[in-house]
Image (spheres, rainbow, N blue to C red):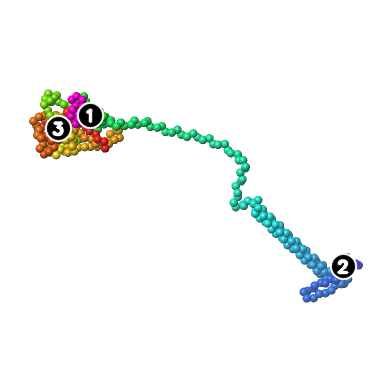
Amino acid sequence: MPSIYTSDIENITQFNNQSNLLFRVHSNNDSKTAIHPQTMTLSQYKMLTTVISEPSNNRLSAVAIAFIVLGVIIFCGVLFALMVYTYRQWKRGKLPLLATPKPPVPPANPIKPPPKPIAPPPPPPPRPPPVPPTPLFQCRKPLCKEYLTRFNIHKRYFAEQYDKCFCMKCHNPSDLKGKCGNWCLELHGWTRFGLDVNKAHMKKWNLFQTSYYGTSSNLLSFILANRFVPFDGDMRPDNTKFISGHPKPSFCETSPSLKCASQRKFSTRSSFIASDGNNYYVTVVLLCKQKPNTFDVNEDVKSPKEPEWITKTRCSVVPFGLLVKLQKI
């Protein structure tokens, strides 16, 4: 009866005959045994198969490792070549830097966009109307009236028909006509406002002496209402005493000279900003008629050109004109 291992043994025998090889089986790490193919048993065959297959597996692993190493080397070479190529291109300027990209080069003939429409400039503001030049000399009467309105003096005390302006525009001192004479010369630069006078005094008006009484603007209303120049200490409607401010309060001091009556010791000067924008000093003096033989000449005054009259007679000094003078500051 043939053995179940006949085919295997025959194959092995044929294989060994063809290859003419001797197989050595490692039974352990130290001993080696030579096996003849014709005397091989089944267990030896299995061992032989294992031994034969081990070198084949080892050879396949080495080839794979060799291919892997070769592939890595090729990959590294290709990568290095690519890096060298990229570096050369960058050096030549064909490749821009990634960190600082260059702006795109404009075309040789760029197309200009259509210009934006320019809005027309706003119209200039309207010019103020030209201010007429201020004449060298302007009539001071309107400015004097403007000043007197500040004190609320009633109109019934005035007589406009006797108003006369002697300002530098309205009066020429070099042209003395008719009855003007020295009297008009003294009034040059002043503006006279006529005052209403009791007709009883008008009968003897020619016998009275002309005099001037210097005063302040805030006392005008009381003096004009009284019709006579009061004395210091007279009671006013507001229960206050009248104080003239003159050097001798026990007398009523007047002067036939306008220059003397307009001095600071008799006439208090005030300031005034007029509607023309200018600032003025204002002096007021009352033009009066004085009863004769009611006054004495003040002997303390040594200048004969500026005499002073003193009187203690009441109702002897009657004002008939208000003189106002503006002096530009």
Start-end of magenta stretch: 171-189
- Name the amino acid, label 2: Ser
Mark 3 vs 2, N-terminal side = 2
Q: Residue furthest right?
A: 1
- Return the residue at label 3: 256
Q: Is residue 39 left or right of residue 156?
A: right
State the image quarter where residue 34 is shown: bottom right
Please tell me whether mark 3 or mark 1 is closer to you in this view: 1
What's the residue at 14%, 29% (across, down)? 210
- The reply to whether the magenta stretch includes residue 184 is yes
Closer to the eye: label 3 or 2: 3
Could one spot residue 237 in this view of the protein? Answer: no
In terms of secondary structure, what is the magenta stretch mainly?
A: loop
Label placed on residue 174 = 1
* Residue 162 lies in quadrant: top left
| Nearer the observer, 191 or 236 | 191
Dot placed on the residue nearer the N-terminal end, 3 or 1: 1
Marking on residue 19: 2
Residue 109, how many percent across, how many down?
61, 40
Residue 27 lies, in percent from the top left, at 80, 73
Residue at left offset 50%, top offset 34%: 119
Q: How far, Cα to Cα, is label 2 from label 1?
A: 168 Å
Q: Residues within 10 Å of mark 1 (few under 14, many from 20)?
A: few
Instruction: Indicate the amino acid at tag 3.
Output: Pro
